[in-house]
Image: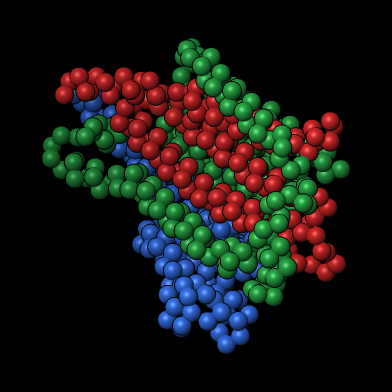
Chain colours: A blue, B green, C red
């Protein structure tokens, strides 16, 4: 893909709007269609597009394994943690009314945090799954070449 | 007008599904599955489920298609052209099951019927009270994150688990290869041996 | 009669799609094709839920000025999460298919089973 300058340039141009749109979907989910699930997927699409054009090695520099793998768990933990927080504040599990003095504010904050957790997990899992598939392919191709040479020697 | 769009889109979906069964070139099948998802997303918009349409367009038509293409790159691009030996038995099973299910629909409430049982139980509570009880104008968000928060926590965990499963199954080829390469014998070209 | 057909048309098509997916799963030997068949089945279930949730003349369940009739938000919630979970589990199925192909060199069910039998015989 090193020579496809049109694809490379348009990818670079497209990535910021895609990510911005994902953030809009994430935080505007209360008012219009959208939410954590969709935002996570759209945010992952930006990384997938990047990987398709620039290859898995450069994608791993943008989203290294030590970021994506803990993020998978972090989202679930954030979600579950909101539930624990509401219990510590004296409510039942995931009872957002406890999070603020006004139940409406509490609900708003709770939904925001929970959706953020969902978005994080979905993003990280989608990027992880895609990069795992692509890296498997790249490693296998890299592994196939030296073997072929050795066969030639034998 | 809505009904006409509905009928046409569903007819398209049947055509695409039949083509997917018929074709043996898996690349073509994957492309058709993208079209299939996009058609269903359009149908969801017609049926007022905008959040679902949004998700289906992003996930079904986008991520699924890319993942399946990735799988094809790692496996085979063609289904093997063997004769359909037992084609009759599955066809009979499918026909009987389908007929039974269609018989079951005969006393279902009609499409769009506002008096259907599904609209009588919890839905009025969600529609009438959720702006007051929870707040967000989008009822789907209120139900998803607040009324049914446990549900969504479970779903998120399932996604997390599936991601871990894929990592366990497909990740880690590199480290295992390196270990095997150190002793003199090189592995097979896939780097895998049978257990 | 026409009213019945129009009223139940959605369900009938859903059943046709469901059976198309079911047929692919049981009649085709290729594991990747089976996963695609499961996907067709899954989408037909989504369509059925959303069909049940639609209300004649209703609008999307987002509060807006001047609208009083909304479609049912509950099926939307159930299906929206199911779609994302569906793609995650599909990825798991595809990963299994990749590993099977790496171990057996094929994705055809009968060839895999034959190889398995031979290995059992050797052991």
Q: Nearer the viewer, residue C28 or B168?
A: C28
Tally of numbered tags: 0
**In the rendered view, does B160 fall on the left or right side of A40?**
left
**Is A112 placed above or below B25 here?**
below
Q: Nearer the viewer, residue B178 or A151?
A: B178
Q: Residue at x 54, y 43 (%)?
A: B64
In this rendering, would C107 be left or right of A152? right
At 53% from the left and 72% from the top, the residue drawn is A113
Task: Out of B87 and A124, give the one closest to the viewer.
Answer: B87
Q: Is residue B176 above or below residue B31?
A: below
Would residue B9 appear left or right of A22 to someone viewing this image? right
**Quadrant of image for the N terminus of chain C:** top right
Q: Image quadrant for the C terminus of chain C?
A: top left
Q: In the rendered image of this protein, does residue C28 appear above or below residue A48?
A: above
Taking the view exactly as shown, the residue that stands out farthest to the left is B183
Is residue C15 shown above or below B54?
A: above
Tell me residue C14's x, y (percent).
Answer: 66, 35
Residue at image point 46% right, 83% down: A89
Image spot of residue A22 (x, y percent): 60, 62
Residue C19 visible (yes or no): yes
Q: Position of residue B12 (x, y in %)?
A: 72, 32
């Amino acid at each position: 893909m090193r020579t496809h300058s049109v694809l490379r340039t348009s990818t670079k141009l497209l990535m910021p709007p895609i990510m911005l749109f994902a953030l809009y979907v994430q935080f505007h989910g209360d008012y219009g269609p959208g939410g954590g699930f969709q935002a996570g997927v759209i945010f992952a699409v930006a990384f997938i597009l990047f990987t398709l054009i620039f290859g898995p090695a450069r994608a791993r520099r943008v989203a290294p394994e030590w970021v994506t793998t803990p993020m998978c768990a972090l989202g679930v933990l954030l979600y579950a943690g909101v539930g624990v927080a509401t219990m510590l504040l004296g409510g039942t599990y995931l009872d957002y009314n406890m999070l603020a003095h006004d139940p409406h504010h509490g609900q708003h904050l709770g939904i925001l945090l929970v959706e953020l957790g969902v978005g994080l997990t979905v993003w990280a899992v989608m990027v992880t799954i895609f990069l795992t598939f692509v890296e498997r392919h790249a490693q296998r191709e890299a592994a196939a070449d030296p073997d072929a040479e050795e066969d030639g020697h034998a | 007008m809505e009904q006409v769009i509905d009928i046409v889109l569903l007819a398209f979906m049947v055509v695409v599904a039949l083509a997917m069964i018929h074709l043996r070139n898996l690349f073509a099948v994957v492309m058709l599955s993208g079209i299939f998802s996009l058609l269903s997303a359009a149908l969801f918009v017609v049926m007022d489920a905008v959040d679902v349409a949004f998700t289906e367009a992003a996930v079904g038509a986008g991520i699924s298609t890319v993942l399946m293409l990735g799988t094809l790159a790692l496996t085979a691009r063609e289904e093997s052209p063997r004769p359909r030996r037992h084609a009759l038995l599955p066809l009979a099973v499918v026909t009987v099951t389908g007929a039974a299910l269609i018989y079951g629909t005969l006393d279902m409430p009609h499409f769009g019927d506002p008096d259907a049982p599904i609209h009588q139980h919890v839905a009025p509570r969600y529609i009438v009270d959720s702006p007051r009880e929870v707040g967000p104008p989008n009822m789907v968000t209120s139900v998803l994150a607040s009324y049914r928060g446990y549900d969504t926590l479970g779903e998120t965990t399932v996604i997390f688990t599936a991601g871990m499963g894929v990592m366990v199954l497909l990740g880690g080829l590199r480290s295992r290869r390196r270990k095997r390469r150190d002793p003199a014998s090189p592995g097979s070209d896939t780097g895998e041996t049978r257990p | 009669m026409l009213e019945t057909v129009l009223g139940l048309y959605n369900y009938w098509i859903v059943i046709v799609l469901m059976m198309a997916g079911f047929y692919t799963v049981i009649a085709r030997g290729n594991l990747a094709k089976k996963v695609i068949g499961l996907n067709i089945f899954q989408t037909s279930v989504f369509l059925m839920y959303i069909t049940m949730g639609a209300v004649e003349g209703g609008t999307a369940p987002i509060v807006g000025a001047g609208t009083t009739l909304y479609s049912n938000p509950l099926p939307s919630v159930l299906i929206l999460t199911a779609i994302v979970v569906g793609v995650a589990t599909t990825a798991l199925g595809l990963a299994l298919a990749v590993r099977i192909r790496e171990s057996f060199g094929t994705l055809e069910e009968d060839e895999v089973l034959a190889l398995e039998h031979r290995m059992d015989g050797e052991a």
